Amino acid sequence: MAATTIPESMQARLTSVLQWPPINVSDDYIYRSGGTMNVIAPSLTASTTSRWWLFWLLAAIILALSGLVAFGGDFSVEAVRRVIRLTAQMSLVLFCTAFSAAALARHLPSRSTLFLRRHRRQIGLAFAFSHGVHAIALAVFSRMDPAQFDDATDPAMFIFGGLAYLFIVAMAATSFDRTAAWLGSRAWRLLHTVGGYDIWLTFMIAEGKRAVHDAYYWPYVVLLVAALAMRWLRGNSGQAAR
């Protein structure tokens, strides 16, 4: 996948808002080379440490809401199932935000979209954390009521969901400085691109099946479609610019 070149006007806005250029190589997926900025793997500098407050804040919110739902329902089977639904929905929103952050910053540049772009790695790891809580809730559900768990699941869910979880673990593990450097930028791009689309497809299958029978899930389907459309728009405009 070729690097995406950001127009000069956008570079100026990035320079003022994100304080370019960063130290040494990159700053959360962007680096400067020959007067342009290109998308690559995550930052290998120490300048991103101040951004981790966002991850810890999101993780605390996820844990607090999950705990309130679980213990507010006396940790019953139904309360655990509500935690499963809650974490799935929080994960979807966090994933779509990280998945489309670069495209939003490119096509709708503002302080808020550039903030999301700059913190995409932390948002992505918060998504992985949320889905980790989701997996724990699923395991608890399977132990509390195996019969209900069997009725609520099917083999396709384990196949698609299992593959998505493998990508989530691999992408989260390679979102840190040392592991990203070890993997290399080309392999990193391949993993995070293929993994991102696989996770998107898994969410779409899960929400699409529910949306057919319940209009409550339509906003999540719309959000997934919008995130994908924004991502493709970014890719097509980048090819046209070249």
Image (cartoon, helix red, strand yellow):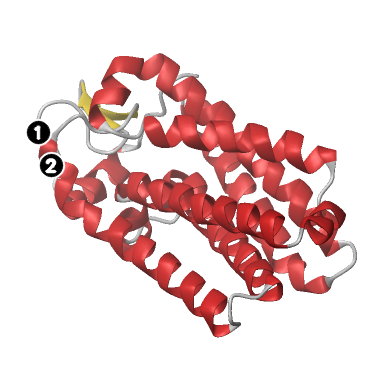
Q: Which of 189/138 is in front?
A: 138
Q: Of the residues shown, which amino acid type is indicated by label 1?
A: Ile
Q: According to the image, label 1 marks what residue?
A: 23
Residue 42, placed above or below residue 115: above
Q: According to the image, label 2 marks what residue?
A: 47
Give the percent coordinates (x, y) of residue 220. Answer: 68, 62
Q: Is residue 111 in sight in this rendering?
A: yes
Q: How crowded is the residue under tag 1: few (<14 C-alpha within 10 Å), some, or many (20+)?
A: few
Give the percent coordinates (x, y) of residue 83. Answer: 60, 68
Give the percent coordinates (x, y) of residue 120. Answer: 37, 47
> Which residue lies at the image location 50% right of the left edge and 70% below the top edge?
66
Q: Of the residues shown, which amino acid type is indicated by label 2?
A: Ser
Residue 77, placed above or below residue 122: below
Q: Which of 24/103 is in front?
A: 24
Question: Are the two marked residues, 1 and 2, in contact with CB atoms closer than 8 angstroms?
Answer: yes
Q: CA distance from mark 1 to mark 2?
A: 7 Å
Q: Would residue 69 be found to the left or right of residue 181 on screen? A: right
Q: Would residue 81 be found to the left or right of residue 166 on screen? A: right
**Numbered badge on residue 241:** none
Give the mark nearest the N terminus, 1 or 2: 1
Q: Which of 181/15 is in front?
A: 181
**Res 178 quadrant in image:** top left
**Disc 2 on helix, strand or loop?**
helix
> Which residue lies at the image location 84% right of the left edge and 45% below the top edge?
154
